[in-house]
Amino acid sequence: MAVSAEEFKKALQLWASGITVVTTNSEKFGTQGMTVTAFSSVSMNPPQVLVCINESADTGEGIEESQCFAVNILSSEQQDASNNFSGGCSQEERFANTRWSTASTGAPMLDDSLVSLDCRVVNKVLAGTHWIVIGEIEASICRSGEPLLYYRGGYRQLAGA
């Protein structure tokens, strides 16, 4: 028998994670973005990553239509961006409060993020309540700084940062 949702949540709070904002732009839904901690590399050749997005998230609909997305790995200076893209305000407000530029795929890339990865969707798999979206990286931008981390329900920084 599987563990309860509460037990699962409690266990995963002990997993330190980086924080990303996944963004897209589509004709039907416009510019969209959301905070995502479920992000991972998949393959070096070809270069691929995955993000997990709740099937009820509106950003997922935009990714489905556009077939592209950007993963923006947040810097330790972007706690406000993480909160902003977590919900509570409209998609328009999220982008109005954040500096961004357009990637070659059309996906928004956050200008102050530690890393931005411009991706084309190559696969999508439904697992429970979430879509696992795999993207091939078409372009990347790396900037200097330290990552924003999340652990036990709160933001953290690297020791000595």
Image (spheres, helix red, strand yellow):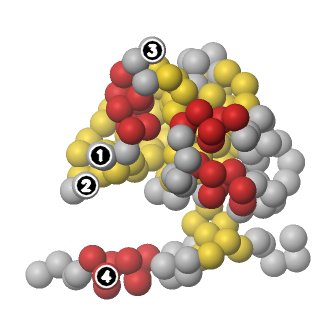
Q: Residues within 10 Å of mark 3 (few under 14, many from 20)?
A: few
User: Is residue 46 shown to the viewer in this render?
Assistant: no
Name the residue type under label 4: Glu
Eye-nearest disc, 3 or 2: 3
Q: Give the residue pinned by disc 2.
A: 129
Q: Give the residue pinned by disc 1.
A: 55
Percent x, y for residue 37?
Answer: 52, 58
SS category of the residue bearing label 4: helix
C-alpha distance separating marks 1 and 2: 6 Å
SS category of the residue bearing label 1: loop
- Looking at marks 3 and 1 on the same chain, the residue that comes earlier in the sequence is marked by 3
Q: Residue at x 58, y 18 (%)?
A: 106
SS category of the residue bearing label 2: loop
Q: Quadrant of the N terminus?
A: bottom left
C-alpha distance separating marks 3 and 1: 20 Å
- Looking at marks 4 and 1 on the same chain, the residue that comes earlier in the sequence is marked by 4
Name the residue type under label 1: Glu
Residue sitting at the far left: 1
- Looking at marks 3 and 2 on the same chain, the residue that comes earlier in the sequence is marked by 3
| Left or right for 57, reference 159 | left
Numbered badge on residue 27: 3
- Looking at marks 4 and 2 on the same chain, the residue that comes earlier in the sequence is marked by 4
Q: Residue at x 70, y 35 (%)?
A: 96
Q: What is the count of numbered marks? A: 4
The quadrant in which residue 17 appears is bottom right
C-alpha distance separating marks 3 and 2: 26 Å
Name the residue type under label 2: Thr
User: 90 or 105: which is nearer to us?
Assistant: 90
Numbered badge on residue 118: none
Name the residue type under label 3: Glu
Numbered badge on residue 6: 4
